[in-house]
Image (cartoon, rainbow, N blue to C red):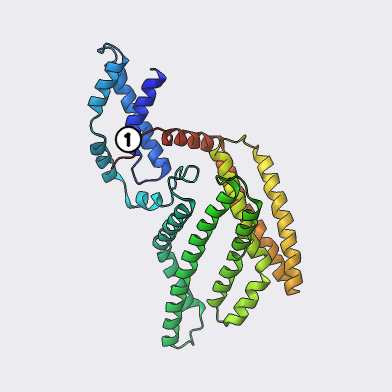
Amino acid sequence: MSPFITNELMILAEQVARPLRTTPRRKLRIREELLRKLSATFEDEVPASANEADALAKTREKFGDANSIRAELERSLGFVDGLFWHLSPGGEILAPKESGLRLAVRHALQAARFVLVTELIGLSLVVVFFAFVAWPVTTPAPERYLKILALTTLGIVWILAAVSTVVFLGHAMWSAFYGPNGRSPLRIMIVSALSFLVGPCMAFLGGLASPNNWESALVEALRKSPGFGAVCPFALIVLVRVIHDIATDQPARRWYQGVLVHTGWALALSLLAFLLGLALSGDLPTALENGLAIVLITAFWLMPFDLFLSAPAVIARVRRYREWESLPIEAQG
């Protein structure tokens, strides 16, 4: 089978699969399965055809209408497929078909909607636990119910604000590093400064859920600002660089090289956060908490994320996915 025929069969499969609202991994499986069926059909038609072009035409005819096949596949997709589709930007970050600002806002809203649906049950369980177990049983019933309502509202606003803000800042960091005008150190510093505020703001909102008043919550957030503030810009810089290296086929590092790089940066930043926290609070446990924030986010999220995306099987899957997405067709449906 010539490369031209393979490409034409891939286009037939992609006309069905591209508009499907499901996860990239399942969409890739659907594409590969359709391609296998089309290839088998083509091979069956070759002996009875004058040439490959004739066999390709018969394969197209047997394949049928792409819209009908897609409608049948969509009926087999579940609620979870559509839910996770909202967090699957595909290749848009690398080649946006709309302005960067509009793309960032849309993804931030999609992420917020996803979190609102998936976290509501868990948040409700947490609220019930604090309301009926953690808080003193001597609290009058009306006051307890008011706290439930306040904590629920605060939790929803907290999670939605955090997720949408981080996604939006992630787009801004990507643009600062890999935008059309090239890397901009000034924009990187501005986005880093803005993202530095996320950690202290979240710590402040979290403090409001405790029995303490807003003044003590503000003081506590300021005491934790060096470590908690550095987490977001550090994580965004690492994530956009890792995603860019994988998506643009940069030479892969060995796993231990990635571990050494992450460990070195995490230790350096955690030491700085520890010293700043000690200077601000004068309290050793608070200073240690500042330093541990960066170590924990690196050890349990950033480093595993990098190692996962650097795995040969994942790299091969990403390349295959990009090969499908680069096919010159218009999404139908």
The amino acid type of the residue labelled 1 equals Gln
Which residue appears at 33% of the width and 43% of the height? 20
Where, quadrant-wise, is the C terminus in this rendering? top left
Q: Secondary structure at mark 1?
A: helix
Q: Position of residue 112 (x, y in %)?
A: 44, 60
To which quarter of the image does residue 97 belong?
top left
- Could you classify mark 1 by the number of other residues whose Cα lies within 10 Å: few (under 14), some (14-19), or many (20 or more)? many
Quarter of the picture containing the N terminus is: top left
Q: Quadrant of residue 225?
A: bottom right
Residue at x-position 32% and y-position 15%: 52
- The residue identified by callout 1 is 15
Vertically, is 255 above or below 120? above
Q: Residue furthest front?
A: 181
Residue at figure coordinates x 28%, y 17% from the top left: 55
Q: Position of residue 261 (x, y in %)?
A: 69, 46
Q: Position of residue 310 (x, y in %)?
A: 58, 39
| Left or right: 273, with 233 as reference point | right
Foreground pick, 165 / 42? 165
User: In this view of the protein, can residue 270 be seen by the observer?
Assistant: yes
In the rendered image, residue 84, in percent from the top left (x then y), is placed at: 40, 51
- Asked if 175 appears above or below 332 in the picture, the reply is below
